[in-house]
């Protein structure tokens, strides 16, 4: 990861900004037909984000970048049906769909949503 940040650093002009976005929720809220049905498990994803953050801290410490701004947003993914939702979120890295969520999604023809928090950071090249 530090290698990737070093390459990005080299590609940016001094003062250039890297926009870093990461989904950061430990659990992703799922609704079917507007009714909450539970949460997806993202323990593995949270570990991946922690590893990325550790490498980013190394880039800060080495003087490659400085944090210019950080904020969080709630992002809602909307799917036409539970089955479509299950097909898509089943491909998300580090995400587990518990059986208690998978079953209603498989059977649901109503609109499904998945809601999570996303961190947006602006990292300035030094």
Image: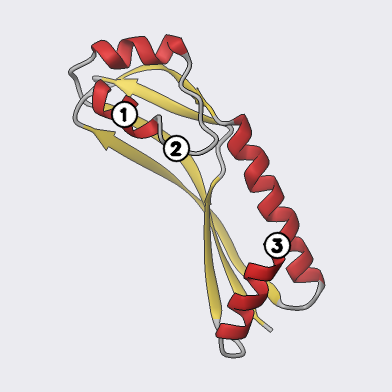
Which tag, 1 or 3, sits closer to the chain's start? 3
The residue positioned 70% from the left and 49% from the top of the image is: 51
Label 3 sits on a secondary structure element that is helix
- Residue assigned mark 3: 56
Disc nearest the viewer among 1 and 3? 1
Q: CA distance from mark 1 to mark 3?
A: 32 Å
Q: Which element carries disc 1, helix, strand or loop?
A: helix
Circle 3: is it few (<14), some (14-19), or many (20+) Cα within 10 Å? many
Q: Nearer the viewer, residue 26 or 103?
A: 103
Colouring = secondary structure
Q: The C terminus appears in which quarter of the rendering? A: bottom right
Query: In the visual, does 106 lie left or right of 55?
Result: left
Density class for disc 2 (Cα within 10 Å; few <14, some 14-19, many ≥20) is: few
- Quarter of the image with the N terminus is bottom right
- Quarter of the image where one finds residue 41: top right
Q: Which residue is tagged 1?
A: 87
Report which residue position mark 2 lands on: 92
Residue 55: horizontal and vertical position, in percent?
73, 59
Label drawn at residue 43: none
């Amino acid at each position: 990861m530090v290698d990737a940040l070093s390459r990005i650093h080299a590609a940016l002009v001094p003062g250039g900004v890297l926009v870093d976005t990461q989904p950061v929720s430990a659990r992703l809220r799922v609704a079917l037909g507007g009714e909450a049905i539970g949460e997806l498990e993202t323990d593995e994803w949270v570990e991946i984000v922690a590893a990325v953050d550790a490498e980013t801290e190394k880039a800060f410490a080495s003087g490659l970048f400085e944090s210019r701004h950080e904020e969080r947003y709630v992002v809602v993914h909307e799917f036409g049906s539970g089955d479509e939702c299950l097909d898509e979120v089943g491909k998300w890295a580090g995400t587990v769909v518990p059986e208690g969520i998978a079953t209603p999604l498989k059977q649901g023809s109503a609109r499904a949503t998945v809601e999570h928090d996303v961190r947006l950071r602006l990292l300035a090249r030094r």
